[in-house]
Image (tube, helix red, strand yellow):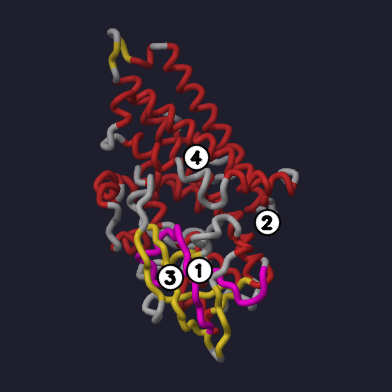
């Protein structure tokens, strides 16, 4: 098993270590005992948002002025990793953290009134939020989105659909990217669309290969009248916000990959020491030892690149290429490590009651979500990686 220090990024301080301890205790008490049951039920209790907020973990990374508890991306990564590794439920952690991509644009570009109306209740655990960008026919082509918002006095009339929306079933509001202008990236705006708005409904809850405990929805907007006061930032000005938000999201996803692989590695190493074959633990066979060595090496490399990218973002640098590199490296790694963990477990690794089986399914989303691996390569090639 990794030494505790190996879980930390190089930029971390004693403050990060204390936060990791806090998150780990929460996960062991509130997440781990229920992880398998929540996955099978394909949901976790909504009350858990309030429990996480009461523990002081929902607002990490957000300023006091909006109800947060301070900190930056490094603190967010520390909490997210510990929740995954100790809690063992990727779906629950992802669902609990959907505000991590929905709230930042409002914090950065919204008015104080918008921040208090939308962000503060989410950080208090009384509301659930979601980001709605992807469309049924659009995928990674954000500039080509077609959900239309037509100005009508003090409202926009919104018509269209979104899909693959994390927490979309439960969300009290979604931050939706809509087309208020002409074609291309210059005609896109951000609107907060609230649950209960006539014409806004959940088309269906989507069933997924992994992340079972999180809800994922397809949403429909049928002539929704949304107040202009719910627009975040200037009209037609959302695309730069989306781009900036993507960079942080990709680092968060890379961090989740590191955490998932850490847990898979620990589980595989534990099992290799316990499983007896041909009269000795399978960890005594060179082929297994070398497989574990490769897993540890891949994990350490991805953690280092993710840490470098996070460090530069925390310093205030805009490094989309490096963030894309970190995401690709981490997603390649987590798929390989989880596959190796299942192989070490053998038949047991193919059974749904084992943690590595769940992680194997969860890992497959990461080369797709938050921008596909192919899109990341496009970003890297256009920025020369940095």
How far is the residue under mark 2 from the one under mark 1? 20 Å
User: Disc 2 marks which residue?
Assistant: 316
State the CA–CA distance, disc 4 to disc 1: 29 Å
312 vs 346: above or below: below
Residue 318 can be seen in this image? yes
Question: In the rendered image, which quarter contains the N terminus?
Answer: top left
Q: Which residue is rendered at x = 74% and y = 48% of the image?
A: 383
Residue at 40% over, 78% down:
199
Label 1: which residue?
64
Q: Quadrant of residue 318?
A: bottom right
For disc 3, the marked residue is 220
Q: Secondary structure at mark 1?
A: helix
Left or right: where does residue 79 sit relative to residue 125? right
Disc 2, SS:
loop
- First of labels 2, 3 by sequence position: 3
Q: Specify which label sits upstream in the sequence, 4 or 1.
A: 1
Magenta-tinted stretch: 156-183
Residue at the location (56% across, 72% down)?
178
Badge 3 density bin: few <14, some 14–19, many ≥20, Cα 10 Å:
many
Disc 4 versus disc 1: nearer the observer: 4
Circle 4: element type? helix
């Amino acid at each position: 098993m990794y030494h505790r220090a190996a879980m930390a990024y190089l930029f971390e301080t004693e403050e990060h270590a204390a936060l990791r301890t806090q998150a780990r205790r929460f996960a062991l008490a509130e997440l781990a005992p229920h992880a398998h049951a929540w996955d099978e039920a394909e949901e976790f209790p909504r009350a858990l948002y309030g429990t996480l907020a009461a523990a002081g973990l929902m607002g990490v990374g957000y300023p006091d002025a909006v109800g947060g508890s301070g900190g930056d991306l490094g603190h967010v990564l520390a909490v997210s990793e510990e929740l995954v590794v100790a809690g063992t439920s990727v779906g629950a952690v992802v669902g609990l953290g959907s505000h991590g991509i929905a709230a930042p644009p409002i914090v950065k570009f919204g008015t104080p009134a918008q921040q208090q109306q939308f962000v503060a209740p989410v950080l208090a655990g009384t509301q659930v939020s979601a980001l709605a960008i992807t469309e049924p026919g659009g995928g990674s082509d954000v500039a080509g989105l077609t959900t239309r918002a037509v100005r009508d006095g003090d409202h926009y009339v919104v018509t269209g659909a979104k899909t693959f929306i994390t927490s979309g079933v439960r969300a009290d509001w979604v931050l939706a990217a809509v087309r208020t202008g002409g074609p291309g990236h210059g005609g896109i705006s951000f609107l907060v669309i609230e649950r209960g708005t006539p014409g806004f409904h959940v088309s269906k809850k989507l069933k997924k290969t992994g992340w079972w405990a999180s809800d994922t929805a397809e949403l429909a907007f049928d002539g929704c009248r949304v107040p202009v006061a719910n627009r975040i930032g200037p009209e037609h000005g959302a695309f730069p916000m989306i781009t900036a938000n993507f960079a942080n999201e990709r680092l968060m996803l890379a961090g989740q990959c590191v955490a998932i692989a850490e847990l898979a590695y620990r589980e595989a190493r534990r099992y290799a020491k316990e499983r007896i074959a041909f009269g000795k633990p399978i960890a005594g066979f060179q082929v297994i030892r070398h497989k574990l060595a490769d897993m540890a090496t891949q994990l350490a490399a991805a953690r280092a690149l993710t840490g470098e990218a996070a460090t530069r973002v925390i310093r205030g640098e805009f490094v989309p290429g490096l963030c894309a590199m970190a995401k690709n490296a981490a997603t390649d790694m987590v798929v390989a490590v989880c596959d190796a963990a299942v192989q070490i477990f053998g038949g047991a690794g193919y059974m749904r009651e084992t943690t590595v089986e769940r992680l194997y399914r969860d890992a497959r989303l990461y080369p797709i979500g938050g921008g596909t691996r192919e899109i990341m390569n496009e970003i890297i090639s256009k920025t020369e990686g940095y």
